[in-house]
Amino acid sequence: MAGENEIKNSNCSSSLGQGPPAPTTHLPNSMSGQDTTTEKVTLKKEIGLVSACAIIIGNIIGSGIFISPKGVLEHSGSVGLALIIWVLGGGVSALGSMCYAELGVTIPKSGGDYSYVTEIFGGLTGFLLLWSAVLIMYPTSLAVIALTFSNYVLQPVFPDCIPPYDATRTLSLVCLLLLTWVNSSSVRWATRIQDIFTAGKLLALGLIIVVGFMQIFKGNYEELKPSNAFNFWKTPTVGQLALAFLQGSFAFSGWNFLNYVTEELVDPRRNLPRAIYISIPLVTFVYTFTNIAYFTAMTPEELMSSNAVAVTFGEKLLGYFSWIMPVSVALSTFGGINGYLFTSSRLCFSGAREGHLPSLLAMIHFKYCTPVPALLVCCGATIIIMLVGDTYTLINYVSFINYLCYGVTIMGLIVLRFKKPKMFRPIKVRAVQYNMLLPVCLSLYHVYKEEDIIAFFVYGCDHTTLISLLQMHQQTYGMHVYLAWCPKDQLM
């Protein structure tokens, strides 16, 4: 292992160096007794445009499109409104990705939201975002994807019941440990896995879309006719619409993940925005038409009663080849786990490099040039969360805090425009774009919180409500940790 210190004869390129200056350690030459030339051990620039697109698409298309349709439809109250929410989710992701593209090329540091917020607002705000991400956002998302992977793999083995708790957790654990080992061993292996499984999941969703269009050409689109699509079986409240959007937004989460590995991108000022502009529209198209395909095979009642939407779709339309669906979803979620591990470990690495996490997490393996300690921490946190929550509770838990972090980061973009108006910006987002997105992020967080508080006092404290209420105070706990942990000269 090596930290940000100077090490002899490293094969890793000097791509970092945006963090604080590191101590220099010289290793003596055993033959001459003299100091030798030293070189910094850092992460390599190995991610090209294709791999960059694969990271974005692979992180977005994980488990969400196979589990979120049920939650979106449940809370929206009609097929038509559910489809509109899916399109809006893609639009909000596109606006957000444009803002992040500007930040990514203006502040070319790995770490994404955390690095930008720390640079703009200072250490305390950056630490609170890091605190939320490391403890909640990424371990919870990883847990959801891992549980979805095991549920779909085991569903054919237990066709008449829900797969047993112990079986799903054990398989999720094996998958998580395997991919942690791969990511610890080689960046190239990890990105190759991402490339291959991204292609596989697009082919699987492409199959669903093609079969759906065949159904439409046969005239099997009763639920999509305007008279039926907007036939509400319940009138959704503002809070329920927010929950529907948050369920859908979980399927789009990951659109900002390329910003976490900016320093490993080849020519980031060129490839970062290109990858975003290619990936987000593609994912929005795929998601919208996948949901249209679902409704050609299932009624709203059938979709909401299914715990494995893609499996139900396959059983209805693919006949003998219905086994393709659980296999395809398993491949998709396997790639999603790999992508989340790859990017979330870089966030831990960046936080440790800035002094906001233990310095051990900023260490890089001397031979493989991978952040092994950060990967192990991400794996451990995910295992803990995976053992204490079910899939839909975890989705509700993570989605709203995501949008709070997005809102704070985009607010930072606006502040940076005023603080450093002459700063070089290879990409500059129009004001109307972030002015549209910021209120969406903050209002969703606000509405969701109001729903939780009202639910707590009116309906009592169920598991989901209690988790959300406890989460409201996690930033306060984080502030106390920061004040105790951070050196006094870095408090602001």
Image (tube, grey):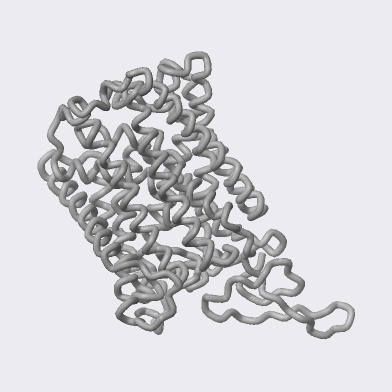
Residue placed at 24% from the left, 26% from the top?
A: 225
Residue extending farthest right: 31
Q: Residue at x 52, y 21 (%)?
A: 323
- Return the x and y of residue 289 as percentages of the image width and height: 38, 35
Q: Is residue 236 visible?
A: yes
Q: How many marks?
A: 0
Seen in the picture, residue 252 relative to 67 is either above or below; the reply is below
What is the quadrant of the N terminus in the image?
Answer: bottom right
Q: Quadrant of residue 47?
A: bottom right
Image coordinates of residue 492 in percent, x first then y, are 35, 80
Percent of width and height locating residue 189:
66, 49
* 81 left or right, relative to 174: left
Give the residue drawn at x 53%, y 28%: 327
Q: Which residue is at the front of the view, 69 or 276?
A: 276
Residue lying at the far left of the rendered structure: 458
Q: 232 above or below 414?
A: above
Q: Residue at x 58, y 44 (%)?
A: 177
Farthest front residue in view: 217
How far across and how far down the image is residue 434, in percent?
Answer: 29, 64
Vertical relation: 59 (above or below) 357:
above
Q: Nearer the viewer, residue 220 or 348?
A: 220
Q: Is residue 283 above or below residue 443?
A: above
Q: Quadrant of residue 394?
A: top left
Residue 384 in sight here: no
